[in-house]
Image (spheres, rainbow, N blue to C red):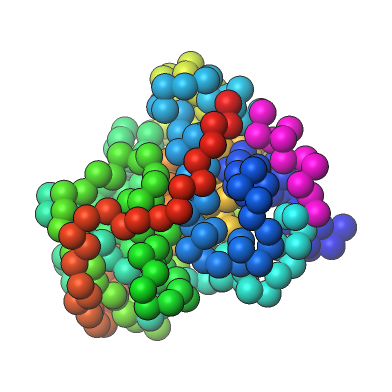
Amino acid sequence: MSALEQRIEDFLQAPLAAAFLVLADRNDLDGDQLADPATACTLASTALRELNPWSGGTRPAVVRADVLEAARPLRSLLAAVLADERNSWWDAPLQRDAQLLLTGREDRQPDPFQVPVPVGPIGSWETYAQKPVHALITSTELAVPAGEPIRSSAHAELACGASDWDPAYPVDQRRLQVAEHARIAEVHSAADWHALSTRYGDPATHHGSDSSLREVAEIDNGLAPTWSALAADYDGVHLSFAGLLSALYVPVSSPQSGTTTLWAWDWECTHWIRSVFIDTTALPQLPEPPQAMNYWQPLG
């Protein structure tokens, strides 16, 4: 099996990638339209809104199963999109000169030059949310026209997502320059997340997956990296756009660490656990949520 064929299989087994394809098909979006980064990010955030385990609609596991089945006839569309060189940014390594930091008036993001390095064992919230509690979060600036409001995956989340990030406007925007020596752990697949969790997780501090996630959404979140251990080798963890689509809600199991399921990262982003920035540029504030095309259709 070629690398492309394997990637196609990975995407067809991933609920978010499947929902992305189903919404694209129902909105009559072709390969050329999906090659637009703003369109792709908007569609992903819209799809993720439907898959959110706390959305209150149809049982999340049923929705995930339905979209996986509905996406099966869309294999040719997926193959064309994944083979399109215009979409190479989907699984590109972190772009160090294009990291956008968006901060609402009440957000508790650390100063880029004073990011606290995690210490000690992982906390219960960090296991549940699969994130370091005091991280700084950036998203990669997209190659879009100057007037495009969706300038990153984070902008798409603000426009049409359903995460618990609800910033108070105006939102400050800064472009950060990442040092060349910064060490980045790349997550492009569910297997990558499982490998990070296996290598840096501590089974002794893991008391089982969240009971609400198991009961309501049938998600076994499993072990998460102990961020203080990961900080010995890395300065940040980057979830690529391809990783977002292909890893969320996909369980991976191994005898060493059991099952892990990445579920709580909502857009292409990097969680920084150390200050590795050499420059910051202030950009115009966002006075209100960015406007995006409405691709919403019920999936359940």
Q: Image point 45% across, 53% down: which residue?
A: 293
Q: Image point 16% across, 53% down: which residue?
A: 169
Query: Which corner quadrant holds the N terminus?
Result: bottom right
Quarter of the rendering containing residue 77: bottom right
Can the viewer see residue 68 in this picture? yes
**Residue 29: percent from left, percent from top:** 64, 55
Which region of the structure is painted magenta? 66-76
> Outermost residue, right direction?
1
**Residue 113: percent from left, percent from top:** 18, 72
Foreground of the two, 299 or 59: 299
Count numbered badges in the picture.
Answer: 0
Foreground of the two, 147 or 216: 147
Task: Tell me: 123 left or right of 106.
Answer: right
> Outermost residue, top direction?
215
Tell me if residue 22 is in the magenta stretch.
no
Task: Tell me: 2 left or right of 49.
Answer: right
Foreground of the two, 182 or 265: 265
Tell me if residue 73 is in the magenta stretch.
yes
Can the viewer see residue 185 in this picture? no
Q: Is 84 situated above or below 241?
A: below
**Residue 122: percent from left, percent from top:** 33, 41
Task: Tell me: 167 left or right of 157.
Answer: left
Q: Image point 24% across, 72% down: which residue?
A: 174
Query: Which corner quadrant holds the C terminus?
Result: top right
**Residue 98: percent from left, percent from top:** 38, 76
Q: Image point 63% across, 74% down: which residue?
A: 86
Main SS class of the magenta portion in the image: helix
